[in-house]
Image (spheres, rainbow, N blue to C red):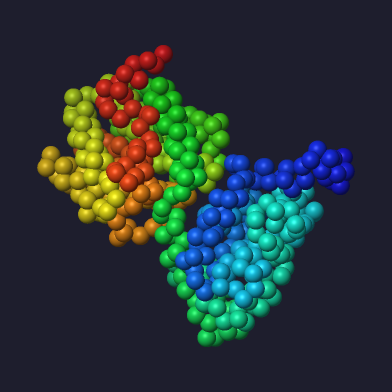
Amino acid sequence: MSFRRWSVLMTLFGMTLFQGALLSQVPTEYKKEVYQQRRVKLAQLLGDALAIVLANPEPAIDEFVQNNYFYYLTGLEVPHAALVLWPGAPRETWKEILFLPPKDPQQEVWTGPKLAPGKEAAELTGIATVLPTTQFEAMVGRLLGQHPTVAILNEPIGLDDPPTRYLQLVQKIRERYPALPVINLSVYLDDMRRIKDDDEVRLLQKAIDITEEALLAAMRAVRPGMYEYELEALIEYEFKRRGAMQLAFPSIIGAGIHTTILHYNQNRGRIEDGDLVLMDVGARYAYYCADVTRTVPANGRFTKEQREIYEIVLEAQNRALAAIRPGVKIRDVIHRAAAEFIREKGYGDYFPHSTSHYLGMDVHDVGDYNKPLEPGVVITVEPGIYIPEKKIGVRIEDDVLVTADGYRLLSGKAPRTPDEIERVMKKRQ
Ligand SMILES: [Mn+2]
């Protein structure tokens, strides 16, 4: 069937061609209000500044994954697109402009139909002005002729790295308008992304649920004689079959001495009788990352020594959890609660990392750590003790939503206490 006839047919079924295409590009039901609300909120913060946010380019071979900031504001998985927000624009139609690559049937042979400029894109997104990306430079040049402050994302790069697309953009802007003030958009956007809205909490919960189902499957499957990569494969299979788009980070599956290497992800070792097995994993679902760690005995029973260490880490985690409430800071209060307990027990030198990080579209999510917690912030709580000479490494990691009166545990379906873990593992065939 020709491309055109198929398109006509899809229209007959009450569905335009690219809406069909969008279903494959947007992993969840597209709710334009979610993204509209975020743009309205950003507009309030921007004042008179004009913000430019770029979509990721389409790689030749690798899987396309959208830029987090662009996705956060549009929900669109279209490569090479751009969004311009200018709440102070002198014309109403300039306040929100979406740039999409023009329709390219030849490219679509390779990577499928894409949302293109037009009325339907405007209706879908609620953005009144949708232009082809071929007009991006001319249009932005015209807008900058009105001398707004320009806000772009300041992406950190190394000294030897080529300039980012944003830096190239700034250079061009500077050539044409040397006096134009340029500010860092992440100041506003990172602040917004730090506080999760309801839709984000829903997607985080889904990513976490998938991750815990996979951890439960791993607990039921692990036994001495298996290789770490077999558990890795099982966990990642469970992620994929439950709709995860990708891994939030490379899976850390370590047995024995490998439990004491914080970011061990070779996952090549053999799991021996008497080993602990540490699994630090996370599914990424609809752009939201989970990050959960469970440490279990390979043979289903903790040794006395393993259980002793495990219970110290568990109590440290419970103390950190109990400290979570709006107004406190991660380092001053939450990390201190865990670290002080571990130090009291004599293992202060064996807890070399911090207790919490923000969690969201990035696994180590954006946001200022000097700010006190507020309702809507999502963090991990992950104390650990690592004793290489004993081949004992224990980390317990859970994901938590800060609420008005404390916190809500988003993870915790996969057992955390030694008794619960042993009970689950007893049921193995
Ligand atoms: Mn973590």
Query: Which residue is at the far top?
Result: 429
Q: Answer whether residue 232 is visible to the viewer in this image.
A: no
Q: Is residue 249 above or below residue 68?
A: above
44 sits to left or right of 422: right
Would you identify the image quadrant in which residue 81 lies? bottom right
Q: Is residue 356 above or below residue 153?
A: above
Q: Quadrant of the N terminus?
A: top right
Q: Quadrant of the C terminus?
A: top left
Q: How many numbered marks have been drawn onto this rendered protein structure? A: 0
**Residue 387: percent from left, percent from top:** 22, 39
Determine the residue positioned at 26% across, 26% down: 418
Determine the residue positioned at 45% across, 38% down: 205
* In-front residue for pair 165/375: 375
Determine the residue positioned at 21% across, 35% down: 315
196 sits to left or right of 415: right
* In-front residue for pair 151/32: 32
290 sits to left or right of 39: left
**Residue 47: percent from left, percent from top:** 49, 71
Q: Answer whether residue 25 is visible to the viewer in this image.
A: yes
* In-front residue for pair 279/269: 279
**Residue 215: percent from left, percent from top:** 41, 30
Determine the residue positioned at 30% across, 23% down: 420
Would you identify the image quadrant in which residue 257 lies? top left
